[in-house]
Image: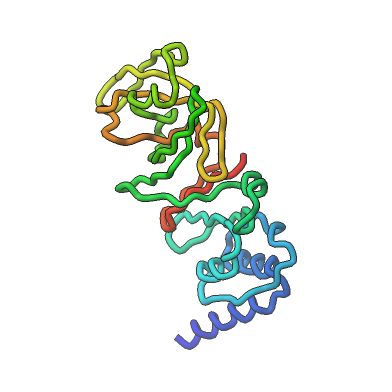
Amino acid sequence: MRVLALLIIGFVANLQAADSLQDQLRELAAEHDFTIEGLGRLGDAPAGHAERTPQATLRHLLQGYNYVVIQSRPNVIDKVRIISTRGANPKEAAANGSFVQTRKNGAHHQVDAALVGPNSVTRTLPLMIDTGATTLVLPDSMMSELGFTPSDLQDATSQTASGTISVKIGKLRSVKIGAASAENVEVSFIPDHQLRGHQLLGMSFLQRFKMTIDDANNELALLPK
């Protein structure tokens, strides 16, 4: 126990000896064998107080920044990506990425999205994140609400767990989640009873970004490619 305590004290002392936050984080990354991106966004910020674990130290040092921690297994950090300062202006946020709090629906994450259809009316809907869905998926009953007419849609089929079903394919003018937005996003309309109340955020939107989900903190990061 005494040896462990001395190691912890030495680790904290070394980090606190750094002159800048950038140097402090470089030392932390080297000590715990992970990579860190976006250090230049810290500017000349001074070094801060180190905590007893690297996870706690990151939370403390980067509390004023938007960042993503990528872990391959619990308590092992693989990569840290610093995106922007918290409270960044909209242009900076849009350029550096969007961070959105999610809500859990069983094992799935759900976010609110602003959808604009052919009628240019914005509808804000909860969508379940589904990387297995090729497109954004909505119920048939929303076609008219979003302004789709028969000429805006194409007939298609989709393979589901229940078998092959008929769908209508169209394009939304835009989809926006937090500061991240995309235009001309393909959407599939499926009979309401097939979706059972779910609306899906699929890859026709998500593939426009580098996507990371922080399962522990219920946060979706959408970063520019």
Residue 35 appears in the rendering: no
Residue 57, image x, y percentages: 55, 71
Question: Within the image, what quadrant is residue 60 found in?
Answer: bottom right
What residue is shown at x 57% (from left), y 44% (from top)?
179
Residue 44, image x, y percentages: 74, 66
Between 161 and 147, the one lying in front of the other is 147
Between 89 and 58, the one lying in front of the other is 89
Q: Residue furthest bottom?
A: 2
Q: Quadrant of the C terminus?
A: top right
Asked which colour scheme the image uses, the reply is rainbow
Indicate whether 140 appears above or below 50.
above
Residue 162, image x, y percentages: 25, 26
Indicate whether 154 appears above or below 211.
above
Residue 27, image x, y percentages: 65, 69
Q: Quadrant of the N terminus?
A: bottom left
What residue is shown at x 40% (from left), y 34% (from top)?
132
Between 68 and 218, the one lying in front of the other is 218
Question: Within the image, what quadrant is residue 40 found in?
Answer: bottom right
Between 52 and 126, the one lying in front of the other is 126
